[in-house]
Structure formats: structure tokens, C-alpha cells
Image (tube, rainbow, N blue to C red):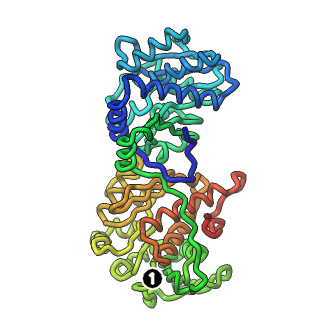
Amino acid sequence: MHAIHPDRSWPLHGVARTRQLEQLAQAQLRPQVLMQRAGLAVAQLALALAPHARTIWLACGPGNNGGDGMLAALHLKRWGKHAVVTWLGTPESAPADAAAAYQAAVQAGVEFAATPPEQPDLCVDALFGIGLSRGAAPRAPNPTLTYWLEHLQRNSAPVLAVDVPSGLDADTGCATTQTVRAHHTLSLLTLKPGLFTANGRDASGQVWFDDLGLHGDATASAHAHANADARLIAPPAPWPRPHASHKGSYGDVAVIGGAAGMTGAAVLAARAALHHGAGRVFVGLLDESTTALDPVQPELMFRAVPTLALADMAVVCGCGGGDAVRAPLPRVLSTAKAVIIDADAINSIANDTQLQSLLAARGARGVATVLTPHPLEAARLLGTSAAEVQQDRLAAAQALAERFACVVVLKGSGTIVAGPGHIPAINPTGNASLATAGTGDVLAGMVGAALAAGLAPFAAATQCVYTHGLAADHWPATRALVASALFAPPLP
């Protein structure tokens, strides 16, 4: 069993692939062995999380998730805990493994009750797990279930969710109004993408993982790694600079943006590029009346946009660009050595089919291109709504990557990086302190520096997204984070 921290990459599997792996594993095992392992794992984690708990309430659903919970109750009772099970199922209607789990729990003397105990010391949500994920048959309203869900939320005791918090979509991270908000989630057999993006991080708390012995089956283990639906981004490797190098070794970045009243966005992106290793950084402000000097960062070189040698640069385009960024976009898309399209540049492309054609043609040529939309900007490019993007963030990011043949960074909780030929990556770092003006401009500048230094677009995007989020994770929770505070050198 592992606690999931942002210290390594993990393969992520949606419901369909998880069920395939389950079938592979079950073909090698005796009946009910997987559920027995799952029940034991839940009980072990419950005991570790609340070693002094006396009463533990296990809310069990009618399917196999409930079976996991009932077997966990069996172990907890044997270990001296007062385990109280409330069960939505019946022995006659339950799946075979869950029915066997019920019989085993009854024989062990586990207490089954119609209502939850008044003051449990720990609650275990074993109601549905992946059973309520996308594509599952809708369930009829059930007053008992509604009461239990409300009780799980109102209760002061910590909640351990089995596999997935009930009501959370394991594939997408979408939550219903009654989604359980767990303090801990034990994901079984596989890690699910929905735990790490959209509403998943808020609902899941600390995620734990037990592969139920999958690593012992070489066939299933190989299948798991080869057929992942997504991966968590790993920490970037240290990138030492050789002594025998110079500013030209790390490339030039040009930031084009900063229309009237919004020059700060372009300056933030430029400063970020400088602090994250670019050899030289040029700023082409679209508000030409602005003083062409940054007194805080005098290393930045201000130039008129038409004079920038885009064919030799990584161009960050759009930060604070407003409507004015529309004019230089055709040249940027046609000639830039590498380009990061952000903010108002994305909106301009979404509203102009000719620009969309130029972006697609750039992708077809295989020229380095990274789009960094937030959900509303992604929706504009896809011709849909932000709500629909958030309903399936992985699918939205992949759709944009395929449409424009480029790397896409879909920002938000659990930022997603997608690109042609790559398994999508979900970022495990970052928090709500990044929800402030300018942090996206900083990220764009960081990616620009990485591209200028020669990193491939997907690697540049994943490394910068991880580092950007990690800086926020290290920020004191008692202080608001402003974008300019993200200018620390890249974290190892």
C-alpha cells in the first residue's frame, strides 16, 4: 500500500481498463480472492488512520464495493473494534462475491444495523466506488442512501472512501451534489484519473493505493503499464548547466502581449522566462506608448513587435494581448520557431477560422506548439461550454491536441497535458492559491524558457506545470500568493 504524493509518476486507469485488469487478475486467482485482499487492505488502512477508534461505521452499497466494506468490518471486529455495517443490499440480490462477503461477516459476528451509529470514530464509505461512474445505469432515488450520504458529510468523524468517494466519477472527476468528501481514499487495483482532476482532489483527500497483488501477476502488471489512460506527472530531473555554455546556449524568448491597460501580464511572462533559464528575453508590447523598461528586471529587452526575429525564438503570445494580439498572430503562427499560445491569443484563434487553419497547419508541419487554455478558453476553441469541458477534462484536452496536432495544457485543478503520441498527463501539484491574476502568464513564460532551451514541447509543458504547482504547494497557507512570487528558480 502506498500513499500517493507528487514524488513519482503513476499510471492511471479509467473504469473500463480497470475492469479489464480485474478480469485478467481474477483469471489467475481463486474466486473471491481479490475482494478478500481488498477488504483486508481497507481494514489495515482504517486501523492505521484511526488506531484508537472504538466504533467504526462502514456504509456498504449493494455491489462489490459494499462487499469490500463488509470484509473490512470482519477484520476490524477480529482486531477488537466495534464495526457497525449498514448495507443497502440483500443476500439474494447481491453479486456472488458480495453475497459471500455478507455471509462471512455475519458468521464472524459483525453487527448489521438499519441506521448509522450515533458517534462513530471513523466512517468508511463503501457505498458505490466506481459503480456510479460514467456509463453506469442511473439509480432510483433512495431515501436511505440519501440519509447515509448526508450523515457521512455531517458527521465529525474522518471518512475513508473505498476506491472512489461515492458520487465521484472515477474517469472524469465530476461530482454530483451528494458526492462524499473523504479525508482519505484507498484506490484499489488501479489509480483512477478522476481522483486527481476536476472535483477529484477536493473529494478524495489523501489518496492511497493498493494494487491487490497485481504486481505479482506479470501479465496483468505489464498490461497495466502499457494500457494506462493517463499518468501522473513525475518530478522533473535536475538540469545542470555545463560550465562551457553561454546565453546563446539557452535560447531566446519573445513575449508578445500587453495591450493598453494589460502590460503587466506580458511583463510577468517575460520575467518568468528570464528566471526559468532563458538566455535572453525580448518583450514586444502591443501598447507601444508604454515605457520600454522594466526597472525591476532591467535584463528584459523591449522591442517593437515587427522587429522581432521570430524564426529564431520561442514566442509566448497572448498574455494581456486583448483584441490587439489578433494582428501579429498570422506571422507568429507562420514563422515562430516555437510558440506558446495563451489567453487572448487563444480567444482570437477561437473566433477566426483562418487563424485556426494556420494553427492546424503549424501542427501538421510538426513545429513546436503549446496551447495553455483554461476551461473557458478551451471551450471556445472546441465550440462548447466550460461546463462541458469540465465534465471530461481528459477528453477535452485530447480533442484539442488531436485537432491542432500540438501540446495542450488544460489548466485547472489537476492540470492536464495532452499531445500527439503521448499518454495524457495529470499534474499532482498546485492548489487554490494559484487562482489569482497572472499565475497563468507566469506558466506561459516558464514554458517559453523550456522550449527556447531545446526541450520537446510535451516535456517542457509537463516539467513547467509540475514546477509551477510545486512552488504554490511550498507557499505558506497563511499568505496570499501573488504571481510575481512564483519567480523563484525551478525547484529540483
Q: Residue 353: where, in percent of width, then height?
A: 28, 69
Residue at image coords 34%, 28%: 138
The location of residue 46, given as percent across then percent down, is 60, 28
Q: Is residue 267 visible?
A: no
Q: Report the number of numbered marks.
A: 1
- Relative placement, left or right, of 46 versus 192 is right
Q: Identify residue type, mark 1.
A: Met
Q: Residue furthest bottom?
A: 307
Q: Quadrant of residue 314?
A: bottom left
- Relative side of 358 to 62, left or right: left
Q: Position of residue 413 (x, y in %)?
A: 51, 51
Identity of the residue drawn at 55% across and 79% down: 278
Residue 467 vertical position relative to residue 67 in the rendered view, above or below: below
In what quadrant of the picture does the N terminus appear? top right
Residue 442 seen in the figure: yes
245 w.r.t. 177: above or below: below
Q: Residue at 37% of width from left, 59% of height from top? A: 422
Of helix, strand and loop, which one carries label 1? strand
- Residue denoted by label 1: 313
Residue 327: percent from the left, percent from the top?
Answer: 38, 80
Instruction: Name, please, the residue furthest toward the right.
Output: 478
Viewer-proximal residue, 366 or 293? 366
Which of the 4 quarters of the picture holds residue 376?
A: bottom left
Closer to us: 281 or 12: 12
Is disc 1 surrounded by few (<14), some (14 to 19) or many (20+) residues within 10 Å? many
Q: Is residue 363 above or below residue 89?
A: below
Quarter of the image with the C terminus in it: bottom right
Q: In this view, does 308 lie above or below 235?
A: below
Which residue is located at x 38 percent, y 56 percent?
A: 423
Location of residue 154 (image quadrant):
top right
